[in-house]
Amino acid sequence: MLKRLTAECIGTAWLVIGGCGAAIFAAGVPDIGIGLLGVSLAFGLSVVTMAYAITHISGCHLNPAVTIGLWMNKRFAAEDVFPYIIAQVVGATLGAAILYFILSGKTGIDIAAAGFATNGFGEHSPGGFSLQSALITEIVMTFMFVMVILGATDSKSHAALAPLAIGLCLTLIHLISIPVTNTSVNPARSTGVAIIEGGWAIDQLWLFWVAPIVGAVLAGLTYRWFQKA
């Protein structure tokens, strides 16, 4: 279990470093910024690379919603859910802390003003979308993400290609929802950067736990229904 939790911690840290790091450091660079497409790909690639690296160790969840979805689908032991979630949140916070220390090395930087790839709604939504829009987006996107994970990793599917399907799905999700919430679908990812931001992101963090968990539970139950004879 220690090895599994360590793998989840490292993997979730890499997700935050890869995805949020691309958003923080590379998205808005004049002339050569990677923009929406680049950040979306960065999140997808971080999942693909870790999936090939640690799936055989921990299953490569990297996300409390994924862990809960797998549990709802009866593919994951109930007693392991909470330890996995703790490891994921610790990893996300570690990844965010690493980004903070890198960013703080830039003269005159204001961490709060930089946004730190936090998730938000209302005035903190990149596109000014409401709480209702954010809630629907996060539930639907997480539902589809967990559905793809459950399908791609099904024993009847092609397991070797699962990381690519999952990574591409996460890329697509970011292309859709970055303008709405800056894309969470992952409570750990949201928590890590919210802790560093330390202000409004903490106040709005509840939505980025509630909505992904609701989406994951619905996906786990739906895929279980598909599997019934």
Image (tube, grey):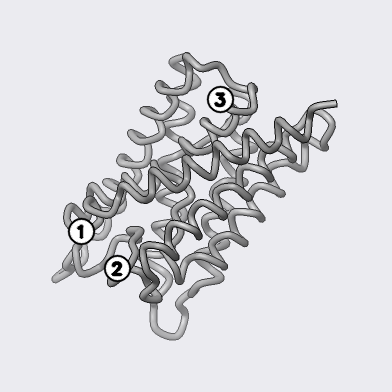
Work out whether 64 lies above or below 113: above
Q: How many marks?
A: 3
Label for residue 13?
none
Question: Residue at position x 80%, y 27% from top?
Answer: 228
Question: Residue at position x 46%, y 59% from top?
Answer: 183
Label for residue 200?
1
Label for residue 124?
2
Q: Which secondary structure lies at badge 2?
A: helix
Label 1: few (<14), some (14–19) or many (≥20) C-alpha neighbours in 10 Å: some
Q: List the residue tagged with mark 3.
A: 58
- Identify which amino acid the numbered label 3 is placed on: Ser
Q: Nearer the viewer, mark 2 or mark 3?
A: 2
- Identify which amino acid the numbered label 2 is placed on: His
Q: Quadrant of residue 50?
A: top right
Distance, label 3 to label 1, CA atoms, is: 33 Å
Distance, label 2 to label 1, CA atoms, is: 8 Å
Label 3: few (<14), some (14–19) or many (≥20) C-alpha neighbours in 10 Å: many
